[in-house]
Amino acid sequence: MPQPEFEQRWRQRFSERGARLDDDAGIAGWTPTGLQARVRQFRALWEAQQREPGLWLDIGCGAGTYTRLLHAHGHEPVGLDYALPSLKKAAQRGGGSALGWASADIRRLPLRDGQADGILCFGVMQALSDPTPALTELFRVLRPGGELWVDALNARCAPTILSEWRRRRRRQPAHLRYDHPQAFRRAAQAAGLEITALEWLPIVPGSLQPLAGLVESRPARMLMRAAPPLGSTLSHSFILRAKRPCREA
């Protein structure tokens, strides 16, 4: 099936980034401070719970930032990406044969049903025209009881709303695709996933980095969980945490 033009543009961009750039942030399409903020917040959430070692997929792994983190936490990770130049660089810095790498499209993963103990999928949904096929495939390869962490760009973030309004005024096409958190939650549930949490990811601009510690603090996260409208207004993206039910209807 032909890919939408929007997706073709992003596939080409990610391949070009992987070939031209050498830093993890640039390959993933983030600024260095943006990627650092995302990794800090992920680690704070991840390390709040203990989990048994297992086979984890890092889908859309780019240069392998999160793949290496999974390995450092004792898991058996496999990084998957459709951009071969990025995969080659991920393998070069990947720490040996304990990490696996594979070229794959998220809608047609080369895995058996229920093969993965867990999945990370970060930085992928915004480059797809529709999240539904990808969520359905993530459900398929996840074992019953397996854990999924998937992120999306937040359509309700105030700076995003302003930026997209300016693009429309200039008659420019959408640069990325943004998701409404509740609609994304419903799409994941329709794919069969059981939602366990929605975590807000605020990112402080580089010029305001002294405020990052405050914005990313545990009290700030608790406040955003208690007041979702505040979290959605301030957060550039969000992580949906889900699992495949052990018993399915």
Image (cartoon, rainbow, N blue to C red):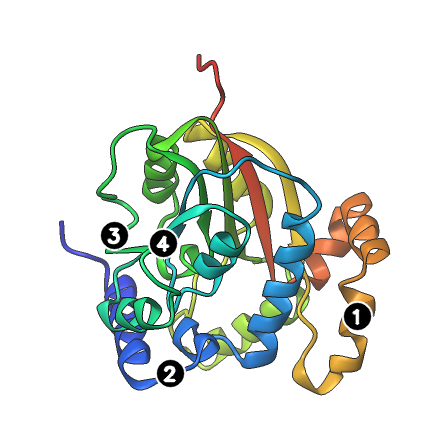
Looking at the rendered image, the disc whose residue lies closer to the viewer, 1 or 3, is 1
Q: What residue is drawn where x is 35% and y is 84%? A: 21
Residue 206 vertical position relative to residue 54 in the rendered view, above or below: below
Tag 4's secondary structure? loop
Of badges 4 and 2, nearer the viewer stands 4
> Distance between the Cα atoms at labels 1 and 2?
28 Å
Of 70 and 137, nearer the camera is 70
Q: In which quadrant of the rendered image does the C terminus lie?
A: top left
What residue sits right under mark 4 in the picture? 98
Q: Which residue is mark 2?
A: 22
- Residue 112: x %, y % from top left: 25, 32
Residue contact between numbered discs 1 and 4, judged by CB atoms under 8 Å: no
Which residue type does callout 4 highlight? Ala
Which residue does the numbered mark 3 point to in the structure image? Answer: 105
Gap in Å between the C-alphas at discs 1 and 3?
36 Å
* Element assignment for label 1: helix
| Relative vertical location of residue 245 with respect to residue 241 in this rendering, above or below | above
If you read the primary sequence from the N terminus, does the residue marked by circle 1 or circle 4 appear first?
4
Q: For this view, does 87 lie left or right of residue 26? A: left
Residue at (78%, 66%) from the top-left corner? 215
- Distance from Cα at disc 3 to Cα at disc 2: 22 Å
Q: Nearer the viewer, residue 243 or 165?
A: 243
The local crowd at label 1, few if under 14, some if 14 to 19, many if 20 or more residues have their Cα within 10 Å, is few
Residue 40 location in percent, x, y?
65, 64
Give the number of the mark in front: 3 or 4.
Answer: 4
| x 47%, y 73%: residue | 168
Relative placement, left or right, of 196 versus 212 is: left
For image coordinates 82% across by 49% down, the residue present is 222
Q: Nearer the viewer, residue 68 or 8?
A: 68
